[in-house]
Image (cartoon, rainbow, N blue to C red):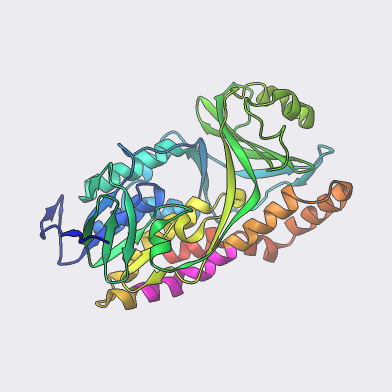
Amino acid sequence: MGRRHVSRPHPRTLGDHVSSTRHAEVAGGGLAGLTVATALAQHGWSVRLHERGSELREIGAGIFLWENALRVLERIGAYDDAVALGDPIGSWRLFDERGRPIQDDWMKDGATRLITVKRTELHQALAQAARRAGVQIETNSQVSGATPEGHLLLESGESREADLVVGADGVYSSVRRSLGLDLVVRDLEDGCMRHLVPRRPTDVAGEALEYWNGGRRVGIVPVTPDQVYIYTCCPAKDLAGRAQPFDHAAWGDSFRDVRHYIDRIPDQSRWAAFHDVRTHSWVNGRGAIVGDAATAMAPNLGQAACVAMVNGFSMASVLAQHDDIAAGLRAWEQRQRGVSDATQKYSRLYGKVGTRWPRPLADARSALVWLAGRSESWQHRVNVAAHAGADLVGPRSR
């Protein structure tokens, strides 16, 4: 390998913050990368964030923001911008093939908030918070890896020296791979399409609805005053379910009670496969991974992005208490990993029950889910991220 050019910014004033000698290089301009970059900058770090695209941009439709993520947004000053047009959700109801309600308040209790927002608006709110904190954002900057000694490697051949390098570069993270943290990246053999459709006055408000029929699931969630978020999930082998253009007839036949929503789905929709990432560790020396690079999971519990944001925020909080960055990163992983692993586990279980359950045993599935919903301890375990994750962030400020 050829010799790499090494660069590192000089200590400088970043917005209202004066940098210490600590500098971080962050790979990835998604939700996790922006959160950790902002939190570090607010703790006095100089931070440079690398986005491989020509601009900061987020794709997707709606997103669930549970209590844990809402507290992060409050702490970094992005809450008002993120939820300005969002919908507070008071309940999450689940229906089976026969149209029977098998959960009246799925994963919801009075102690946790849930707000649904457009994913693009959340991303913009985080980007604005990052800029206010003084994060230096480099676009068209493609990362090829990192070293435990604190070098972020670019595909251009340059090497950026830092006290900390963070990989928030997605499921197929080059930072994770180069740091030797890979264990398994698994295609869960199911996935979904996400849609935004026009909202009508008679549409659902203040609650999320989910319908199951065999391996297919449809979620219907208000997301702005003018739009409804619909997700259509199915096994990868369900070719009609994942067909492009969108097969309105196939989905309408499976979910006749909500066909008036399905008919509004645009023809062109993008199928996204679900993945599960498991690692030996999140840390090697002064290199760390966060977000999908460390904890990718199916979005079955609405917690994938929330967990990523909490872990990014907490990294900065824990490092503020440690002079030794490598030791601080180890303490951070020990603090956060239990909640993240549990959330991944229950997300996998939800997918097995909701998408891969044998069709002849559908009534048994309904009975099982109904019983689980009446167990407070089970519900608390499934929603551990909203409770324990929120506690790790700190008390709510609203």
Q: Nearer the viewer, residue 304 or 145?
A: 145
Quarter containing the N terminus:
bottom left
Above/below status of 208 relative to 153: above
**Residue occupying the far front of the picture:** 1
Number of numbered callouts drawn: 0
> Is residue 276 inside the magenta stretch?
no
Q: Nearer the viewer, residue 234 or 101?
A: 234
Above/below status of 326 relative to 253: below
Instruction: Give the image quarter of residue 145.
Output: bottom left
Above/below status of 184 relative to 253: below
Q: Would you say 4 lies left or right of 111 here?
A: left
Q: Nearer the viewer, residue 270 or 260?
A: 270
Q: Which residues are magenta?
A: 329-342
Q: Would you say 187 lies left or right of 44 here?
A: right
- Where residue 277 appears, as percent x and y from the top left, is 54, 59
- Where residue 394 appears, as percent x and y from the top left, is 41, 63
Above/below status of 259 relative to 354: above
Q: Residue at x 38, y 50 (%)?
A: 73
Q: Residue at x 27, y 51 (%)?
A: 49
> Is residue 331 inside the magenta stretch?
yes
Q: Residue at x 58, y 60 (%)?
A: 344
- Where residue 222 appears, as percent x and y from the top left, is 56, 33
